[in-house]
Image: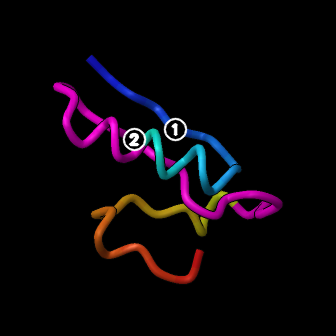
Amino acid sequence: DYIVDAIDSLKDKAALILAATSAPGIFFSSMGAARKIDPTHIKVGNFWKVRDC
């Protein structure tokens, strides 16, 4: 199973992340991608190492 997050609201995003950490499956979350149009700047990484978003 997969959980995919593309939520812009910080409160709702935090609630989903909290719920996803105790759910089985793989969790994907987009962080700070709004209004960024250069796809070469998209990176995949560990959630706990996110910065500059």
Crowdedness near tag 1: few (<14), some (14–19) or many (≥20) residues, C-alpha within 10 Å = some
Q: Which residue is mark 2?
A: 28
Farthest residue to the top: give it: 1
Question: Which residue shows up at 16% across the image and 25% down it?
Answer: 24
The secondary element bearing badge 1 is classed as strand
What label does residue 5 carry, if any?
A: 1
Residue 50 figure quarter: bottom left
Mark sitting earlier along the chain (2/1): 1
> Is residue 21 part of the magenta span, yes or no?
yes
Q: Residue at (83%, 60%) from the top-left corner? A: 35
Quadrant of the drawing holding the C terminus: bottom right
**23 left or right, relative to 40:** left
Query: Which residue is pictured at 28% across the width and 63% down the height?
Result: 46
Query: Residue 17's spot in the image, x, y percent?
Result: 39, 46
Q: Which residues are magenta?
A: 17-38
Specify the label residue 36 is tagged with.
Answer: none
Crowd band around label 2 with a 10 angstrom C-alpha radius: few (<14), some (14–19), many (20+): some
Q: Are marks 2 and 1 in contact (CB under 8 Å)?
A: yes
Marks 2 and 1 sit apart, C-alpha to C-alpha, by 6 Å
Q: Nearer the viewer, residue 28 or 43?
A: 28
- Residue type, numbered disc 2: Phe
The residue positioned farthest toward the bottom in the image shown: 52
